C-alpha cells in the first residue's frame, strides 16, 4: 500500500541525495549492508528492553534502504544482482528485528507472547514468497494492507509507545495475515484468467500463421502464372 502511493514521491525527494552520494565512490551495496548492520543493532537494543534506542536504530536502518536505490539510479548501477541482494537483505533485516522483539518477550514475564513476532515474521515471508512466485509465473502480486513499509512503521509506533507494543503486534499480525490472503486471492484470480488468455493468444497466432500461409501460396501461384506467360 505504501509502495503504491508514496514511493514515487519519496524517490523524487531523495534523488538529489543520490546524486551527492555518487561522488563519494560508495556503491548501493554498501548502504544495503549498512542498513542490515544497523538493524542488527536495533534488534539487540530491543531484545535488551531499550525501546527508545531500538526505535532510533530502526529508523536509521530504514534510511540506507532508501538511499541505496537513489544511489543506484544516480550512478546508473541498478541491476538484477543489486535488486536480488537488496531483497534478500530486507528479509534478513526483518528477521533480525522481529527476532529482537521475540528475544525481549522471552526475557520478560510474557514468554508465551514470543509466538506473535515469530508469526508476523512467518506471515511476512509468505507475502514475499507469493510475490516472488507470482512474478516468476508472469503474474502480479503487489499491494496489500500490510507490506514491509507498513510493518516497519507500525513497529516504530509500538516502540515509541512501548506500553502498547503487544497490541500493536497483534494488529500487525492480523493485517499481515490479511495481506497474505489478499495476495493469494489476487494471484489465484489472475492464474484462472491466464490459461484463457494464453489460449486466445495461441488461436490468434494460428490464424495469423494461416493467413500468412494463404498469402504466400497466392503469391507463389501468381508468380508461376507470370512465368508461364
Image (cartoon, rainbow, N blue to C red):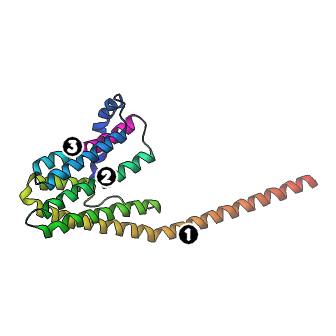
Q: CA distance from mark 2 to mark 3?
A: 14 Å
Q: Which residue is mark 3?
A: 60
Q: Judge left or right: residue 121 versus residue 222.
A: left
Mark identifier at residue 199:
1
Q: Which residue is mark 2?
A: 90
Name the residue located 32 percent from the left edge and 32 percent from the top edge. 21
Q: Judge left or right: residue 141 versus residue 214.
A: left
Mark 2 and mark 1 lie on one chain; the one further toward the N terminus is 2
| Screen quadrant of the N terminus | bottom left
Q: Which residue occupies the foreground of this view, 99 or 189?
A: 99
Q: In the rendered structure, are the residues bearing label 2 and label 3 in contact, judged by CB atoms less than 8 Å apart?
A: no
Q: Is residue 56 above or below residue 151?
A: above
Q: Does the stretch in magenta take in 69?
A: yes
The single residue placed furthest to the top in the displayed view is 23
Name the residue located 44 percent from the left edge and 69 percent from the top edge. 191
- Magenta extent: 61-76
Mark identifier at residue 215:
none
Q: Is residue 90 above or below residue 127?
A: above
The single residue placed furthest to the right in the displayed view is 228
Mark 3: few, some, or many residues within 10 Å (few <14, many ≥20)?
some
Q: Is residue 150 above or below residue 117?
A: above
Name the front one of labels 2 and 1: 2
Mark 1: few, some, or many residues within 10 Å (few <14, many ≥20)?
few
Q: In the rendered structure, are the residues bearing label 2 and label 1 in contact, judged by CB atoms less than 8 Å apart?
A: no
Rendering coords of residue 159 (x, y %): 12, 53
Q: Secondary structure at mark 1?
A: helix
Q: CA distance from mark 2 to mark 1?
A: 38 Å
Amino acid at each position: 500500500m505504501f509502495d503504491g502511493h508514496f514511493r514515487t514521491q519519496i524517490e523524487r525527494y531523495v534523488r538529489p541525495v543520490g546524486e551527492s552520494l555518487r561522488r563519494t565512490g560508495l556503491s548501493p551495496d554498501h548502504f544495503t549492508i549498512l542498513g542490515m548492520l544497523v538493524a542488527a543493532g536495533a534488534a539487540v537494543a530491543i531484545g535488551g528492553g531499550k525501546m527508545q534506542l531500538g526505535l532510533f536504530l530502526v529508523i536509521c536502518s530504514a534510511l540506507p534502504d532508501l538511499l541505496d536505490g537513489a544511489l543506484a539510479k544516480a550512478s546508473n548501477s541498478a541491476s538484477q544482482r543489486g535488486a536480488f541482494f537488496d531483497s534478500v537483505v530486507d528479509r534478513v533485516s526483518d528477521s533480525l528485528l522481529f527476532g529482537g522483539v521475540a528475544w525481549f518477550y522471552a526475557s520478560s514475564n510474557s514468554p508465551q507472547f514470543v509466538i506473535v513476532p515469530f508469526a508476523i515474521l512467518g506471515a511476512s515471508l509468505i507475502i514475499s514468497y507469493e510475490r516472488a512466485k507470482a512474478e516468476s509465473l508472469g503474474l502480479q502480486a503487489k499491494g496489500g494492507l500490510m507490506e514491509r513499509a507498513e510493518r516497519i512503521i507500525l513497529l516504530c509506533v509500538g516502540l515509541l509507545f512501548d506500553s502498547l507494543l503487544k497490541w500493536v503486534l497483534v494488529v500487525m499480525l492480523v493485517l499481515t495475515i490479511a495481506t497474505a490472503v489478499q495476495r493469494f486471492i489476487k494471484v489465484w484470480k489472475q492464474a484462472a484468467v491466464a490459461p484463457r488468455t494464453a489460449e486466445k493468444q495461441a488461436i490468434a497466432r494460428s490464424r495469423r500463421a494461416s493467413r500468412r500461409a494463404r498469402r504466400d501460396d497466392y503469391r507463389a501461384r501468381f508468380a508461376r502464372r507470370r512465368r508461364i506467360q
